[in-house]
Amino acid sequence: MYDDYECETCDKRFRTQPAANQHMDDTGHWEPQFECETCDKRFRTQPAADQHMDDTGHWEPQFECETCDKRFRTQPAANQHMNAVNHHKQHHWPRL
Ligand SMILES: [Zn+2]
Ligand SMILES: [Zn+2]
Ligand SMILES: [Zn+2]
């Protein structure tokens, strides 16, 4: 009746947190916590998620051209695009 520690993946319950952890270690039942930002894949560790994103190129583009809607993964790539097509915004450009 004191089986208060639950495996996050299956419905098994345990009396102690270490017992639950042990089960999760043994069965690989840890709930994946780290999500690819692009697809719906989930991973148990941040490095595994990073690795997937590296492998698949799934990093979410974070840097946006301020003039058109293109998006880039890095600020230099965005800057390069803006230089190349010469469409930096006319108003104050924030210094990096
Ligand atoms: Zn389990
Ligand atoms: Zn992905
Ligand atoms: Zn642009």
Image (spheres, rainbow, N blue to C red):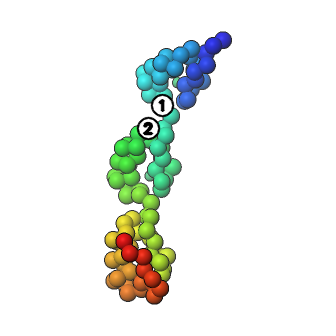
Horizontal and vertical percent for residue 50? 37, 49
Among all residues in the image, which is located at the extreme top? 1
Horizontal and vertical percent for residue 93? 42, 80
Query: Which residue occupies the foreground of this view, 10 or 62?
Result: 62
Q: Earlier in the sequence, mark 1 or mark 2?
A: 1
Q: Quadrant of residue 83?
A: bottom left
Q: Relative to 32, does residue 40 appear above or below in the rendering?
A: below
Q: Relative to 96, does residue 47 appear above or below in the rendering?
A: above
Q: Quadrant of residue 60?
A: bottom left
Q: Which residue is mark 1?
A: 30
Q: Which residue is mark 2?
A: 44
Asked whether residue 27 appears in the rendered view, the answer is no
Q: Quadrant of residue 26?
A: top left
Query: Which residue occupies the foreground of this view, 92 or 7?
Result: 92
Q: Residue at x 53, y 16 (%)?
A: 16
Q: Relative to 26, does residue 77 appear above or below in the rendering?
A: below
Asked whether residue 76 appears in the rendered view, the answer is yes
Label 1, label 2: how far apart the Cα atoms are: 7 Å
Q: Residue at x 33, y 71 (%)?
A: 76
Q: Identify the amino acid type marked 2.
A: Arg
**Residue behind label 1 places its C-beta within 8 angstroms of ligand 1:** no
Quick check: 12 left or right of 52? right
Q: Identify the amino acid type marked 1.
A: Trp
Horizontal and vertical percent for residue 29? 48, 28
Q: Residue at x 54, y 30 (%)?
A: 9
**Residue behind label 2 places its C-beta within 8 angstroms of ligand 1:** no
Circle 2 SS class: loop
Q: Quadrant of the N terminus?
A: top right
Quick check: 88 left or right of 17? left
Q: Quadrant of the C terminus?
A: bottom left
Horizontal and vertical percent for residue 70? 45, 74
**Crowding at mark 1 (Cα within 10 Å: few <14, some 14-19, many 20+):** some
